[in-house]
Amino acid sequence: MKAILQRVSRACVTVDNAVAGEVAKGFLILLGVEQGDDETEARVLADKIAGLRLFTDENDKMNLSLADIDGEVLVISNFTLCADCSHGRRPSFIRAARPETAEPLYEFFCERLLQNGVRRVEKGVFGADMQVSLLNDGPVTIDINSKDLKR
């Protein structure tokens, strides 16, 4: 499972010109579920993200977590994170999990963030054509793969 995590001052996702989710200070997470991922991958990734200290303290050091700042999270499903661009010019998305597998893991990931004390988790619409806007704070952008994390 792959995540692109962006520290934001605000983020919003719209579907068919209607707001589907929006948050203030916190994280925007683009989440890609790969074939072979399971609840263990989702749990490890959510636990790591919930505890990451990426917000600045009074000394302007990245030393505070989401819980410390009462932060919010917007999670957007994004199968294109699973792209294989190693051959040719057209990416292959064969590594992406099928929707019937990916959607429950996406939902589990979001629930696990809440279980880890994240105050508010907003979501996009799984499988929809979404427009995402954000104000990246920093900018701070982190690429995380659950396969690289200790179990």
Image (tube, grey):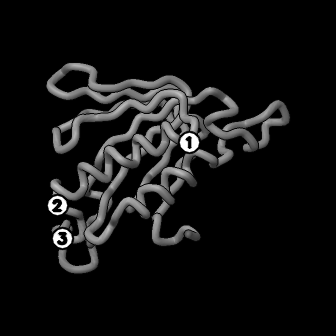
Q: Residues within 10 Å of mark 2 (few under 14, many from 20)?
A: few
Please state the horizontal and vertical placement of residue 103, each as a whole percent of the image.
Answer: 24, 49
Numbered circle sitting on residue 94: 3
Please state the horizontal and vertical placement of residue 109, each as a whole percent of the image.
Answer: 40, 48
Placement of the C terminus among the 4 image quadrants: bottom right
Work out whether residue 104 or residue 58 is closer to the camera in this orientation and state it: 104
Please state the horizontal and vertical placement of residue 143, each as a whole percent of the image.
Answer: 49, 58
Q: Amino acid at mark 1?
A: Asn
Q: Amino acid at mark 3?
A: Ile
Please report contact status of discs 1 and 2: CB closer than 8 Å, yes or no.
no
- Total labels drawn: 3
Which residue carries the number 2 mark? 98
Considering every residue shown, the one lying at the far bottom of the view is 87
Q: Amino acid at mark 2?
A: Arg
Q: Secondary structure at mark 2?
A: loop
Q: Is residue 85 above or below residue 108?
A: below
Please state the horizontal and vertical placement of residue 65, each as a whole percent of the image.
Answer: 66, 40
* First in sequence: mark 1 vs mark 2: 2
